[in-house]
Amino acid sequence: MAGDMLAKVADLLEETLQVHKAVKNAVLCTREGVVVAAVSEHEDIDPRLLSTVSAALAWAGNSALGHIDQSSPTHLIHSTRIESVITVVQPHYHLVVVVSKANNLSFDIAKHLPELQSLATRIELLMSSHSEFSRETLLGNIVEAIPEITQAMLLTLDGLPLGSVGFDDEIEIAALIGSIFANGLTFSDSTEYLFVNSNKTDLLVYQVDEKRLLAVVCRGPNPDELAQKVLDLVEQIA
């Protein structure tokens, strides 16, 4: 059943490639930057990089607009001299589309955006209709399984937040945590996690994969034991 679902998602992503000859990559990812499916006309872009960066930009855009006028982004456009990366934001998944600017290809974003948004909505509805694909996030699983955890964050290796629970200043905290882990990496390029300990609080920073970090604040009379619970859980579900 899961295979049939992913096949249908891949078909919709293939439709995305057909929107215009300039479209060369289409990626479906979760809001925490995990790749669900990807199709490509060219294999020159890592879909994991696209998903992680797009998820981080969506989070940052949501935070920025929230502070400006309490609105949320519907899509983001990241433009360079050679290509544009369009992220169509949905409640649980993002559709990431790479559009080439090479060979004078003329792609009218305003013209084609409604079609991309329609495809993203169809994929979101398709994914949401099947119980095999849980919409629970990594952070959601942690705070549900371990209710003592009230502050946790998923972020990129560069210190950009991907999701947050219990923090008000996500951007600043993510930057600090990213810096801490980067310094830890100077000891070894295979660092799995770092503990920052005090008598009452532990800060656990765990490398989920090659693109993402998880930071969890563990408080209480036995913060070390709580941190170990988090480690055991993450190693099961990450």
Image: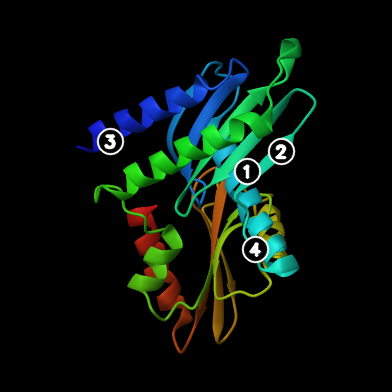
Question: For the residue marked with disc 1, what is the amino acid?
Answer: Val
In primary-sequence order, the first of circles 1 and 3 is 3
Q: Mark 4 or mark 2, which is nearer the start of the sequence?
A: 4
How many angstroms separate mark 1 from mark 2 (CA)?
A: 10 Å
Where is mark 4, residue-wise?
Answer: 71
Residue bearing mark 1:
53
Of circles 2 and 4, the one toward us is 4
Q: How is the image coloured?
A: rainbow
Q: Residue at x 45, y 63 (%)?
A: 139
| Horizontal and vertical percent position of residue 205 | 56, 62
Which mark is in front, 1 or 3? 3
As rendered, which of 15 and 186 lies closer to the eye?
15
- Which tag, 3 or 4, sits closer to the chain's start? 3
- Cα–Cα gap, marks 2 and 4: 19 Å
Left-right relation of 13 to 101: left
Q: Quadrant of the N terminus?
A: top left
The amino acid on which the numbered mark 2 sits, given as a three-letter code, is: His
The residue under the point 73% across, 20% down is: 101
